[in-house]
């Protein structure tokens, strides 16, 4: 069962999080709490995001106005990792012949990418 935290609990649990900072993160839609009859409810993922946001701003001295972009990039990376994990599972379920063809295509694509300078 998911665990939810109230605003006061979040403020107590996250180092260096203040009420104005929390409101700014919510206003910037970096964190989106659930609306409940008792007020905003925060999930475990919100707790982790808020701690990361405070660490990025305070420890790594990232300007707070850059945090939405940084978190968007982190979200995109996490989505891509999940997609890659699902793709790897799907490929692993295929017969050896299909996996071999996929490996051949990937090797070819890597060579073409290196030769044309389109890789990173």
Image: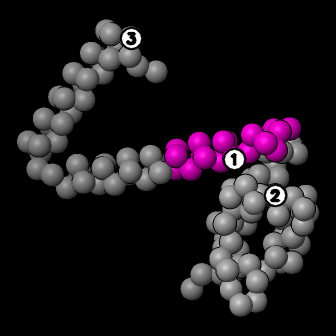
Prevalent SS, magenta region:
helix
Q: Nearer the viewer, mark 2 or mark 3?
A: 2
Q: Which mark is residue 68?
A: 1
Instruction: Give SS at disc 2.
Output: helix
Instruction: Give SS at disc 3.
Output: loop
Query: Is 65 on the left or on the right of 112, as rendered?
Result: right
Whether tag 1 and tag 3 are in contact, CB under 8 A, the answer is no
Residue drawn 79% across the image and 42% down it: 65
Q: Please provide percent x and percent y for residue 82.
A: 43, 53
Q: Please provide percent x and percent y for residue 68.
A: 69, 47
Q: Is residue 80 above or below residue 118?
A: below
Disc on the earlier residue, 2 or 3: 2
CA distance for labels 1 and 3: 31 Å
Residue drawn 73% across the image and 55% down it: 28
Q: Is residue 108 above or below residue 100?
A: above
Q: Residues within 10 Å of mark 1 (few under 14, many from 20)?
A: some
Is 91 included in the stretch rendered in magenta?
no
Query: Is 73 on the left or on the right of 55, as rendered?
Result: left
Question: What are the residue bounds of the magenta stretch?
Answer: 61-78
Query: Is 36 on the left or on the right of 102, as rendered?
Result: right
């Amino acid at each position: 069962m998911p665990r939810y935290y109230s605003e006061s609990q979040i403020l107590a649990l996250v180092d260096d999080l203040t009420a104005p900072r929390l409101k700014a993160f919510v206003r910037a839609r970096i964190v989106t709490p659930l609306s409940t009859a008792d007020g905003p409810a925060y999930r475990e993922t919100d707790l982790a995001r808020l701690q990361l946001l405070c660490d990025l701003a305070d420890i790594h001295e990232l300007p707070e106005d850059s945090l939405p972009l940084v978190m968007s990039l982190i979200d995109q990376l996490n989505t891509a990792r999940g997609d890659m994990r699902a793709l790897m599972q799907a490929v692993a379920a295929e017969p050896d012949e299909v996996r071999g063809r996929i490996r051949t295509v990937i090797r070819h694509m890597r060579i073409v990418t290196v030769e044309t300078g389109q890789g990173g």
